[in-house]
Amino acid sequence: MLHDQYRLKKRGYGRVEYNFSYYSFCGVDKAGLLSALGMRDTGNVDAHGQFDFTMAQLPDQWIVCRYNNLGNPPAVMRQALSLHGMLIACDVHEGEHVSRVECYEQGELKWSILHDGEAGDTLDLQVAGIVPPEFTALRKAAFSAQQKADHDGVTAHYMYWLPLDFAASLSGYRYDRETFPWGTPSFTEIEPVVPAAT
């Protein structure tokens, strides 16, 4: 299920590479997810982001996978991995202030939220599909805060964080935080399963 290539986002004036992705799964068990990924859990605790691909079990049945090698993140077959549950995929390019969240269920992309600040548009937001209604209040608050910051000449990126904050409100996880109200996630290394020699 993993391929050594970037997921590329097409745009009218070129292409940009997301340099970090993480995936939150709900409705699937860890063993089934590892099997679908073609990976195994080594049990090695990832205390400092030293391993390329890691996984953590969160409360409320959520499982998070993250890729720490910013130089070569894999493309994950998102539709296939969401056949038996929900997948919330978060893609970021921190240097260009681009963030995207996609929600897949039963093998289909249900909705997506994208902020593309590369061209300097701090208020950019592109929403597709039917997003849960809880998003509306977060969107209004972020938009108002960004407008005020822009008016006051303050450097801020509320709209960049909006997709990621909304994903965190669903899964309980955001990539730039180490601790949460529910505790601290324990990520362990996962690696590809090597087929047995015949």
Image (cartoon, grey):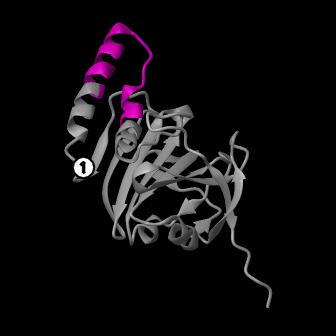
Query: In this picture, which residue range is highlighted in magenta?
Result: 142-162
Residue 187: horizontal and vertical position, in percent?
A: 61, 49
Q: Residue at x 42, y 25 (%)?
A: 157
Q: Is the residue 103 above or below the residue 158 in the image?
A: below
Q: Amino acid at mark 1?
A: Val
View extreme (bottom): residue: 198
Residue 83, quarter of picture: bottom left
Q: State the count of labels.
A: 1
User: Which residue sits at x=65%, y=52%?
Assistant: 188
Residue 141, percent from left and from top? 26, 26
Alpha-carbon neighbours of circle 1 within 10 Å: few (<14), some, or many (≥20)?
some
Please say if 184 is above or below 131.
above
Q: Main secondary structure of the magenta part?
A: helix
In the shown orientation, is residue 142 left or right of residue 195?
Answer: left
Residue ID at (21%, 33%)? 137
Q: Is residue 119 placed above or below 26 in the rendered structure?
A: above
Task: Say if the magenta span includes residue 34.
Answer: no
Viewer-closest of 95 and 42: 42
Q: Circle 1 is placed at which residue position?
A: 131
Q: Position of residue 19 (x, y in %)?
A: 58, 45
| Quadrant where the C terminus is found in the figure | bottom right
Residue 150 on the magenta span: yes
71 or 42, which is in the foreground?
42
Q: Secondary structure at mark 1?
A: loop
